[in-house]
Image (cartoon, helix red, strand yellow):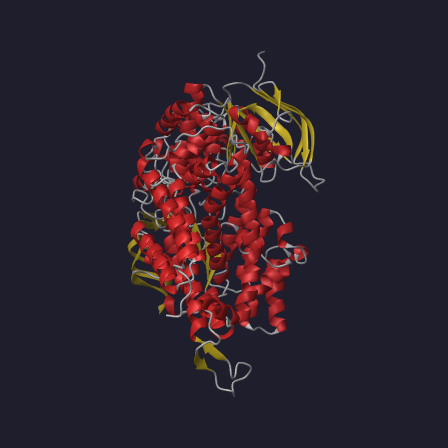
């Protein structure tokens, strides 16, 4: 066997002041030209492993490091981090915060300049890298003027221009809309096939990962719990469930079909394989959608009437938007980056006032509400919980907003204790918020919002960066709050997580409302979804591949469409 | 939408197209003259010239208005301080034995009763205001018209160590991101019912101090992330690197640097030798 490109031998690592191992006895190899996926629950050690491959861990963070990491035969600890840049390129999760230059070409040139590549050669490589990622026309633009997807492509181009042997991508698509994410994975394949660059991709995007990775590593509590070809790991559903990893929907669909005696392992992990195998089954029967558990009332609570908004730079962010949201609605707001989702939400929160039109709550113009009054009507849970936290304890954080209401001490305590108990935070009430995990910090923020007892709750990308269990926990909470009578609005582009939660979908494109319908109809409005950089889920794509009018939207629903009494064709396994 | 970038003006304007070193020469000349001149007519003319230049290169009224709004209380304080208290220094500048009173506060007023503002003190206060305004406007004039990368290359060409030059440029890039973060944190707090505009000064200060916690944490996180990114992209801080665009001084830059040098020498010498720009009572 040839020498591996990367070799980790018994690597363990403890961050400073921590007795909990971020990596524990990790041993693995990466071959040249290989594409390897790295997955696992939040906090399992994925990012730490990524940062260890160019020496950032432990050289930058400190802490205790044991074992050895060799990249192209060189120990990562023997040279400073910048020395490894010629071999290992790192692309991080947040596209915006890793861009440092004032133009696209400068962004790509930066590492090459540091590596003392001659200027004529830099110019060639910059042009080539920009062409590869489809940004050649924008070379003089400022990176912050790009969309999130374009920024991540630029980060890939900057990494590619160095001609590294290995590119390490840490959750590269978690903040991108599905089409932008697909473009990133397409680039991975291109760079790998044309230039032989090896990839280590950490993340929670099973459908996209399954299409490109050769091998999948699962981390749990810093240990490698699986390291095998992707099809073997993604079809080991027991293992994935144990470690909070979601398999691709196509795999889940076939697992459900197997439960009905209609499929046998190994299950497919690629969509095309799934479609092919599904077509070999007997034709599906008509699908009867399940009854809705909680119906919204017909009484509008929040209304936008002909709302338009123009930013100071002239951007028309909303165009004549009319929308009525009812009590107990559970509404998902979808659209690509820049479609107007955030601008619309900011109007709900009175952070922006319409250039034209009006926003009303219970028929009363929003502009007439004071900030404290509005906080008791509309609660906002930001994507980043840390923006809200600044008190010294969980209970102080929750009680902070209540100070404005001038409640009696008894009522204050009733509300604080109530939400603490409701969200399972009683045991943490004296802890400092920043000593908690990200998931617990998110619950503290939700508790602080709920203490004000708002009728409308707005969640901004609540599942971004969460593993399967964390995302489900938050969405389960939103569903419970909705069932208790609150109106829930969720902004997201994680379509696969919405079934079972949202009932209604609003789809925006270029500031216009292009779809306002049920979740089921929205999932099958493929042309509308694709026009705004969204993609139908694999379950929907599979359903439509066997019957264009089959209205199933989840793997379970799709499996139920096939007659379990039918005999399993020999070729369908 | 706001763009977190310092390149807020048209980069193709004649001033923006100048090399960083030419702008630095103009900056130094204007700054030195603002320091050495004490004649209100000269300092006011200088401030006006810089203001006009700011508008000419495209710096918005909004930004300039913001600067003036924020600074007005300080300018008023300067005027009052010099008007009421600066006697000995203006007497030395003018060679007079007494100042000219222009305003007396009634004796009955608490603490300040009986205080007298002088014409000379107020004039000198106005001079200091116009000097301050010159400095304040020179910064955006040079910063907003220069790409951060030009700062780096220009400073390196001026023999500033690359690591320091990069730090200056990175700091300039970082400020807008911090302002965005402050804005986001303030909005988040507003959504919890804390409207700063309806608070008294003390409560506002208390709220600002609380907002500082998430802002500082976020800034530290971002700074750490940038540092990881920089090192991962071969940044070592050493000057032995290449540049995609290695700027060379054009004839125009040479002329501007020459004019700036002549202006500097002429201005300083005429002040020292001929008394031009010295404080006068008008």
Name the foreground residue: A63 vs A412.
Answer: A63
Pick the quarter of the image with the N terminus of chain A: top right
Residue found at the far front of this picture: B273
Q: In the rendered picture of this protein, how many numbered marks are placed on residues?
A: 0
The furthest residue to the top:
A1
Residue B160 image point, x, y percent: 51, 38
- In the picture, measured across the screen, residue A67 lies left or right of residue A555, that is right
Position of A11 relative to B118 (above/below)? above
Q: Does residue A146 appear to the left or right of A175 in the view shown? A: left
Q: Position of residue A357 (x, y in %)?
A: 29, 62
Q: For residue A17, what is the image quadrant?
A: top right
Furthest residue in direction bottom, as rendered: B108
Q: Position of residue A167 (x, y in %)?
A: 50, 27
Near-viewer residue (A336 or B211):
B211
Instruction: Judge whether A570 appears above or below A310 on screen.
Output: above
Residue A172 seen in the figure: yes
Q: Position of residue A420 (x, y in %)?
A: 62, 59
Q: Residue at x 54, y 44 (%)?
A: B223
Look at the image and tell me whether residue A250 can be seen.
no
- Position of residue A232 in the picture relative to residue B7 (left or right): right
Residue A534 or B216: which is nearer the viewer? B216
Residue at 68% in and 40% down: A16
């Amino acid at each position: 066997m040839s020498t591996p490109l990367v070799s980790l031998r018994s690597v363990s690592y403890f961050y400073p002041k921590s007795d909990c191992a971020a990596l524990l006895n990790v041993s693995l190899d990466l071959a040249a030209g290989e594409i390897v996926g790295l997955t696992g629950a939040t906090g399992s050690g994925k990012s730490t492993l990524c940062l260890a491959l160019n020496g950032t861990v432990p050289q930058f963070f400190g802490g205790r490091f044991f074992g050895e990491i060799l990249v192209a035969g060189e120990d990562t600890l023997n040279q400073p981090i910048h020395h490894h840049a010629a071999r290992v390129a790192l692309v991080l999760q947040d596209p915006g915060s890793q861009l440092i230059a004032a133009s696209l070409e400068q962004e790509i040139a930066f590492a090459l300049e540091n590596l003392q590549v001659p200027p004529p050669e830099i110019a060639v490589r910059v042009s080539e890298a920009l062409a590869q990622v489809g940004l050649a026309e924008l070379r003089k633009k400022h990176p912050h003027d790009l969309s999130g997807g374009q920024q991540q492509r630029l980060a890939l181009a900057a990494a590619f221009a160095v001609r590294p042997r290995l590119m390490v991508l840490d959750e590269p698509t978690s903040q991108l809309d599905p089409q932008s994410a697909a473009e990133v994975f397409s680039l991975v394949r291109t760079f790998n096939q044309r230039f032989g660059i090896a990839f280590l991709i950490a993340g929670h995007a099973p459908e996209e990962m399954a299409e490109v990775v050769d091998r999948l590593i699962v981390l749990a509590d810093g240990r490698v719990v699986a390291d095998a070809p992707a099809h073997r790991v993604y079809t080991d559903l027991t293992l994935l469930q144990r470690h909070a990893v979601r398999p691709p929907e196509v795999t889940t669909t076939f697992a459900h079909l197997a439960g009905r005696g209609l499929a046998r392992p190994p299950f497919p992990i690629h969509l095309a394989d799934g479609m092919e195998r599904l077509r070999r089954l007997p034709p599906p029967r008509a699908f009867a959608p399940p009854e809705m558990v909680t119906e919204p009332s017909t009484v509008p609570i929040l209304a936008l009437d002909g709302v338009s908004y123009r930013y100071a730079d002239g951007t028309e962010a909303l165009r004549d938007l009319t929308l009525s949201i009812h009590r107990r609605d559970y509404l998902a707001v979808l659209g690509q980056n820049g479609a107007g989702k955030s601008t619309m939400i900011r109007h709900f929160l009175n952070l922006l006032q319409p250039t034209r039109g009006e926003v009303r709550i219970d028929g009363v113009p929003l502009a007439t509400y004071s900030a404290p009054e509005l906080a008791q009507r509309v609660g906002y849970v930001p994507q980043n919980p840390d923006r809200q936290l600044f008190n010294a304890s969980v209970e102080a954080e929750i009680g902070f907003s209540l100070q404005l209401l001038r409640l009696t001490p008894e009522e204050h305590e009733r509300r604080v204790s109530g939400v603490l108990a409701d969200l399972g935070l009683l045991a943490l009430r004296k802890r400092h918020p920043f000593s908690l995990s990200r998931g617990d910090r998110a619950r503290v923020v939700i508790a602080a919002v709920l203490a004000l007892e708002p009728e409308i709750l707005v969640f901004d990308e609540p599942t971004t960066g969460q593993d399967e269990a964390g995302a489900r926990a938050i969405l389960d909470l939103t569903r419970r709050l909705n069932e208790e009578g609150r109106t829930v609005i969720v902004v997201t582009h994680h379509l696969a997580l919405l079934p079972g939660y949202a009932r209604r979908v609003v789809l925006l494109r270029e500031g216009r409302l292009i779809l306002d319908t049920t979740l089921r109809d929205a999932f099958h409005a493929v042309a509308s979804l694709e026009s705004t950089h969204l993609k139908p889920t694999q379950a929907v794509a599979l359903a439509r591949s066997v019957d264009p009018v089959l209205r199933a939207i989840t793997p379970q629903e799709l499996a139920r469409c096939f007659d379990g009494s039918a005999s399993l064709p020999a070729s369908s396994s | 939408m706001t763009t977190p970038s310092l390149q807020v003006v048209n980069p193709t304007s004649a001033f923006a197209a100048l090399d960083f070193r030419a702008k630095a020469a103009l900056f130094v000349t204007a700054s030195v003259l603002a320091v050495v001149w004490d004649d209100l007519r000269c300092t006011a003319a200088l401030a006006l010239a810089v203001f006009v230049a700011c508008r000419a290169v495209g710096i918005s009224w909004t930004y300039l208005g913001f600067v003036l709004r924020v600074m007005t209380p300080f300018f008023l304080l300067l005027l009052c301080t010099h008007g009421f208290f600066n006697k000995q220094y203006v007497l030395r500048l003018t060679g007079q034995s007494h100042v000219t009173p222009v305003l007396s506060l009634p004796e009955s007023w608490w603490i300040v009763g009986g205080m007298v503002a002088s014409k000379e003190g107020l004039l000198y206060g106005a001079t200091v205001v116009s000097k301050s305004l010159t400095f304040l406007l020179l910064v955006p004039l040079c910063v907003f018209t220069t790409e951060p990368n030009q700062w780096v290359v220009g400073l390196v060409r001026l023999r500033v160590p690359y690591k320091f030059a990069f730090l200056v440029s990175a700091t300039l890039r970082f400020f807008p991101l911090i302002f965005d973060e402050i804005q986001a944190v303030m909005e988040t707090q507003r959504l919890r019912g804390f409207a700063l505009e309806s608070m008294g000064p003390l409560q506002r200060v208390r709220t600002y101090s609380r907002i500082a916690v998430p802002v500082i944490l976020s800034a530290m996180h971002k700074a750490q992330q940038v540092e990881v990114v920089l090192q991962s992209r071969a940044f070592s801080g050493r000057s032995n690197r290449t540049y995609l665009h290695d700027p060379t001084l054009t004839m125009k830059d040479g002329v501007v640097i020459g004019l700036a040098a002549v202006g500097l020498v002429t201005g300083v010498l005429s002040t020292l030798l001929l008394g031009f720009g010295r404080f006068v009572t008008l």
